[in-house]
Image (cartoon, rainbow, N blue to C red):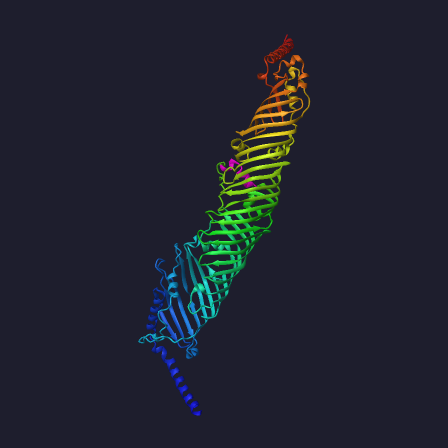
Amino acid sequence: MKKFVRYSLIGGGILLLLLIVGLVAAPYLLNLDSLRQWTEKQAAARLGREVTIQDVGFSWAGPKVRLSGFSIAEGEGFGTEPFADLESFDLKLKFLDLLRLKATVEHIVFSAPRVRVIRDDSGRFNFDDILERLSAPPEASLPLAAMNPGGEAVQAPPIDLLVEQIRIENGTFFIQDATIPRLGRGITCEDVTLLLTDLSFDRPMTIRASLGLNQPGEDIRFEGKVGPLGKRILPAKIPLDLQLTIEPFELARLPKILGPLPMGISGVVSASQKVGGTLEEGILFNGDALLRGLNVQKPGDQQLVAGFDGAFTLGGRLDVSARDLYLDSSRLEAHKAIFEAAGSVRRLGRAPVVSLDVSSNAIPLAGWEEVLPPLGSMLELDGDLTFKGKIRGTPGKDLLADLSLRSEKFEADRGPGLMERSSSEAAAPPAGKEPLQPIKAPPITVKGTAAVKDGRFEKISFSDLTADLSQKGTRFSLDNLSLRAFSGGVQGSAWADLGKLPLAYGSSLSLDKIQVNEILSSLAGMGGILYGTTSMDLSLSGKGTEFEDLKKYLTGKGSLSGEDGRLTSANLAGGASKAASLLGIGGEGSETTFEAMKASFSIENGKMKVQSLGIEAGDWSLEALGDIGLDKTLSLSSRMTLSEAATARIPEERRRLFPKESDGRVQVPLKIGGTVTSPSFALDTSAMGEAAREEVKEKIEEKKEDLMEKLQEDLGEKLKKFF
């Protein structure tokens, strides 16, 4: 036993002496230039790219290997700049582990690496060929004896591989993707740092990383676990369990990253996202984000969004290989509104396919004009709105939203922007004023249903509205429309085209038992003139709501029938009596009460052209035709037919002067002029009999004689003053 210990000590001392001598002599014995050339050759063979190394250094203080000026050539078709290069690569081993035939790497350090990740318009990456070669089994094991330039390659003994630490310091990554328009010019990730600890083939490693977008700093951070890598490294199968953090990021920096934007943007966004899984099986994600003070301006400082705050949460899975995004849930809370969506966005890129189920809470409508100024310019809103439905298709191609809209209370008034669009002066403004531009069609088509329990649009109040809603381009339509308004029922359809200047619109409506005074008050500002219950069929189309535009563009037709009415602006019988007073007919009163009314009409050139108008009262009936101007002027030809009782009250000698019905009832032909609020009446002598015309002439002659006599008397009195 003592001999064994003694010989062991002697042997150990000899081995230690040989090791010390080897450590001192190794830097002199190694041919570092040959090592550089061999490393270039091996790397080029493995990667399939030209690899250059400017310098190789070796030190037994570790031992440690240092490569300087390392560069990998770019793939064919992706330019002339290197695919990757770095200032230096340091590898330090643990010496004592080498004695146990175990390669333990204390650290690997990549100093100032620069890498270009490029994808062409065919979807090919500039590293696809490298991944294919790395995925293939190696042709030979590492020839350790190759450190001796004259040695031959030998099979390396099986050893464990463990890297205690891998670091990337001050890295720069350039990313360019021709399949994504905004990445076509490329993004630079600067100040990239990466720390991997406890790297091995058979257990997860810890990772911490950060980078700045187009500037040094920590805009994005992530940390967590990656791996295990496996004995045969396939990137798509490496498990991930990471926490991704976007530090408060100023959106005003985006133009410097993505290039010029079509509008100005500012605000701060931050996010935290947990991701896990593999690239092959899919990446699971779950996290939230905050948006504060979002401002968006069009060129010319027109504010589109002002001070918008929002909170987002979302979770789902990303299928990287198929470029499919699956949303289990997503939620946006902003301005007392909650929007939710779930579904998928497949084939992410130029032509994604969207399939989402969407919904909201009862969104309060008041106040949105504060954060969306264009909305306030178009409409002033109050009440609530809830939606639920589906969004399907490809943006810019066939994206369709099928929605159910519901409101317990909905109130809207036209804002100045919409009022301006309702005038042709906006489309052709005076010299020196910028013309109004049409609204562009949104990249989506909307259809569905709408329901409003109680509502108001300007002066029109309504309830129990239901309709089929559709939108295509800038045209919005309501079909199968039904509502309660003007104390009656309304059914039909209506549309408006916001892309036309002036605003174009149309409707086809059936109004059942409505109150005439209410509809005249709401639509024409003529309340207090005509009362009664009426039913009406009406179709209209036009552009603009200003009077000049109505005269020029408004067309339509309609018919109505009413009952139990009252006209307060005139007594038709009294007007007829007054007009016929020369014929001995008298009349009293200032209003007209009628039992029934019927009319048919068309609208064009600023006038309602009455084809027929019939009014039934107790002692008379009236038939009329002519024009009622949109400026409220009247030009009607009418014939009032008296009842038998009213006819009997006219002296016999007077009756012969009027046209008669076959049963002897007297007719009084009238011209109705003036305005709706102040009509005038005159006999239509051209429609009266010859006897009446002669008597009128006699009356006129009598008045002429009386006038001549009076003039002569006056003239005589004046002449006396001169003599």
**Where's the C terminus, which quadrant?**
top right
- The residue at the far front in this view is 663
- The residue at the far bottom in this view is 2
Q: In front here: 68 or 649?
A: 649
Q: In front here: 381 or 475?
A: 475
- Mark yes or no: residue 148 visible: yes
As drawn, is 589 to the left or to the right of 153? right
User: Does 426 lie within the magenta span?
Assistant: yes
Residue displayed at 68% across by 21% down? 588
Say which quarter of the image contains residue 561. top right
User: Does 701 lie within the magenta span?
Assistant: no
Say which quarter of the image contains residue 459. top right
- Mark yes or no: residue 606 visible: no
Q: In front here: 341 or 632?
A: 341
Q: In front here: 389 or 527?
A: 389
Q: How many marks?
A: 0
Give the prevailing secondary structure in the magenta stretch.
Answer: helix
Residue displayed at 43% across by 78% down? 97
The relative height of residue 480 versus residue 557 in the rendered view (above or below) is below
- The residue at the far left in this view is 150
Residue 503 x/y as whole percent: 52, 38
Residue 22 x/y as whole percent: 37, 81
Q: What is the magenta range? A: 415-427
Residue 448 x/y as whole percent: 54, 45
